[in-house]
Image (cartoon, grey):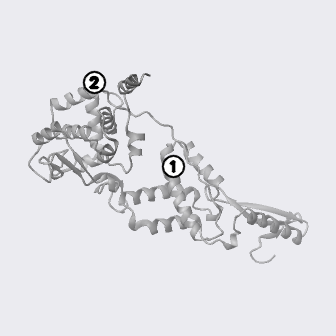
Amino acid sequence: MAKGENIFKRKDGRWEARYIKGHELSGKIKYGFCYGKTYKEAKEKVTECKAAIVNGKQIPPKTRRDRFCVYCDAWLGTNRSRLKESTYIKYTTILERHIKSKLGGYYPQDITSGLIQRFSRELLDEGMACKSVKDILVVLRSILKYAAKQFPGTFPAVEITYPKEQKKEMRVLSMEEQRRFIQYLLGDIDACKFGVLLALFTGMRIGELCALRWENICLKSATIKITATMQRLRQTETGTGHKTRVVIGTPKSDSSMRMIPMTDFTTELCARMDPGQPTAFVLTGSGVYMEPRTLQYRMERYTRECGLEKVHFHTLRHTFATRCVEVGFEIKSLSEILGHSTTTITLERYVHASLDLKRNNMKKLSAVGL
């Protein structure tokens, strides 16, 4: 037996040749076996099997160097400097919990379209949402593109099929529910209830509201300047004793940095609630912030006491966008106020026309005889 051949003579007199033919999703090696009456016969058979792997556009083990997990880490390290902290932590979590744990043991050239399909199906079978699986596959696609550059001309083409998301009907407050909620918040208003109203009147995201300070509200120009957002992120430093931490940073994208004009009513309400401390947080009226998780709890209590069901903080944003469309808002302006990069996002995700609006639009057809 030559060194490294993995060809052995068995107790029954036959010769056995072993070769690597793939990997399980866990990264465990899958071996193939060939048998012959002689050493030569076993060697010929295993050579044919290895040749079949090459013809299938897979590279023999002897030409591979590193497992896929090495390329995952290299890809993350290459992109580290251009990523926001929140994005970096998100990618790290995706790699450690999903991609490296299930695909990290493979050689890059062994990752096929079929393997990725099984990987995707496993994630869905574990109960993961389609959106989350798609996010993981997007990261995986970027790593594969990075790995392909390391093997010019020899890396197999890999197709990734993203799971189809079922469009959910987003909750939007009716006009009656909106009036009732506004009346409830104004009845015994405090800094937090004022903040909730501000979100309903401007479409701000929850993280943007939590990071908003009074210095970002200009009563003279009746505008709100969005320059920051607040998130609770996974703790990356060891020895702190905490799994997560609150971070105030720049908004999620360049388009999220924006100026929001206010209505007269909103401006008057701001003048009434202004604590006179520019650096104070809007939600507390002091230098102590309120994090998104706490605001979510407050929101649950407010809606419960107001008799509203299935209402989350993001419902306010959808309601704002819908009201704007109902009064004939120009979509490009609405998109910029919401902080979207394109009007397509605004139309597809945040605009929900009411039945009354649809009915009024249908009546316009009477003018043309339809």
- In percent of width and height, residue 15 lies at 86, 67
Circle 1 residue = 134
Residue located 61% across and 64% down the image: 108
> Which amino acid type is marked by label 1?
Lys
**Quadrant, the N terminus:** bottom right
Q: Is mark 1 on a helix, strand or loop?
A: helix
Q: Residue furthest bottom?
A: 3
- In percent of width and height, residue 258 lies at 27, 52
Query: Relative to residue 336, is residue 182 depicted above or below?
Result: above
Q: What element carries label 2?
A: helix
**Observer-nearest of 332 and 302:** 332
Task: Give the number of the disc on residue 176.
Answer: 2
- Left or right for 271, reference 59: left
- In percent of width and height, residue 147 lies at 57, 66
- Left or right for 360, reference 18: left
Distance (Cα) linking label 2 and label 1: 37 Å
Query: Relative to residue 310, is residue 83 depicted above or below?
Result: below
> Which amino acid type is marked by label 2?
Glu
* Residue 17: quadrant of the picture: bottom right
